Image: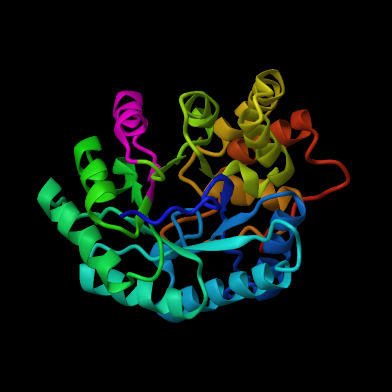
Amino acid sequence: MMLELDWIRGCATALITPFTKSGEVDVPRLRALAERQIAGGVRLLVPCGTTGESATMTEEEDRLVIKITVEVVHSSSGTKNPARVIAGVGSNSTVSAIEYAQSARDLGADALLTVAPYYNKPTQDGLFAHFRAIAEAVSDVPVVIYNVPGRTACNITAATTLRLAREVENIVAVKEASGNMSQIMAILHERPTGFRVLSGDDALCFPLLALGADGVISVVSNEAPDLMSQMVEAAFTGEWEIARTLHYRLLPLMEANFIETSPGPVKAALALMGLIEENFRLPLVPVTEQTRTTMRNTLERIGLLQGTKHVIAA
């Protein structure tokens, strides 16, 4: 019987990881970013995912980022609607993914996000076995599977997602970033009761909410946590005109965030807003000046660049 978790719902933010000029995790800025999310109405924080550049981080750095995020969330625990942490723990090695999952659980993560194994290109049976092994190793923690074939070179089919949802008790949700609306609708239509479907694409969040999805793991909420969380909540309460207006207000920024490889543009935007320094881990590099200009113009049009300035490493 599947775990039913009402709190895996709404706007979750795929947190960026701020780095210092010397390449270390910028802990003060990480805390400030997490606090800003909670102040903006976001109640699900997702550290160490794709947007967090986890592929270039060491296991020790992953632990640090999860630990800091959990600490910030625990400081908000006295609120009526406390925030929670869904920690990214993916790997293309099942053994490593299990180790990461157990570590994140021990650090206090409320749930785990684990991506389809990249590069290996497993069969659907291999994907099922991979996710089942991870979930069984952390049976006391809910698991969200993450389908992003554009990054992993393999797609978790609707049939495999539904099989996992029905057969593995603590696999409770999917972050769907395939962009395949037919596939996502099949999951929404046939999912067992309590299984959550989260959009992995900001631009598809509004239409998927209309189809019955349960929320989004968002990039654009790094820049606009209040607006994105308001959009999702308006859809939940049936205020579709408000939700639609917010969707179209944010859509240019949603699209701009991917004109170069993410998280390049969103980090450029946050630097323009004065919230971080624009530092990356190779092989990612700062965006082009043309992209930076686009980000600046987009932020200004939406009203997110009032009284801020660009901060970039020399």
Q: Residue at x 66, y 26 (%)?
A: 243
Q: Is residue 310 left or right of residue 126?
A: right
Q: Position of residue 76 (x, y in %)?
A: 73, 67
Q: Residue at x 32, y 34 (%)?
A: 187
Q: Is residue 144 left or right of residue 93?
A: right
How is the structure coloured here?
rainbow
Q: Nearer the viewer, residue 287 or 75?
A: 75
Q: Position of residue 161 (x, y in %)?
A: 26, 44
> The N terminus is located in which quarter?
bottom left
As drawn, 179 above or below 44: above
Where residue 219 sits, quadrant-wise, is: top right
Q: Nearer the viewer, residue 270 or 171?
A: 171
Q: Nearer the viewer, residue 206 or 82?
A: 82
Q: Is residue 237 visible?
A: yes
As drawn, 107 above or below 76: below
Q: Position of residue 56 (x, y in %)?
A: 41, 66
Q: Residue at x 64, y 60 (%)?
A: 83
As drawn, 66 above or below 226: below
Q: Which residues are magenta?
A: 173-192
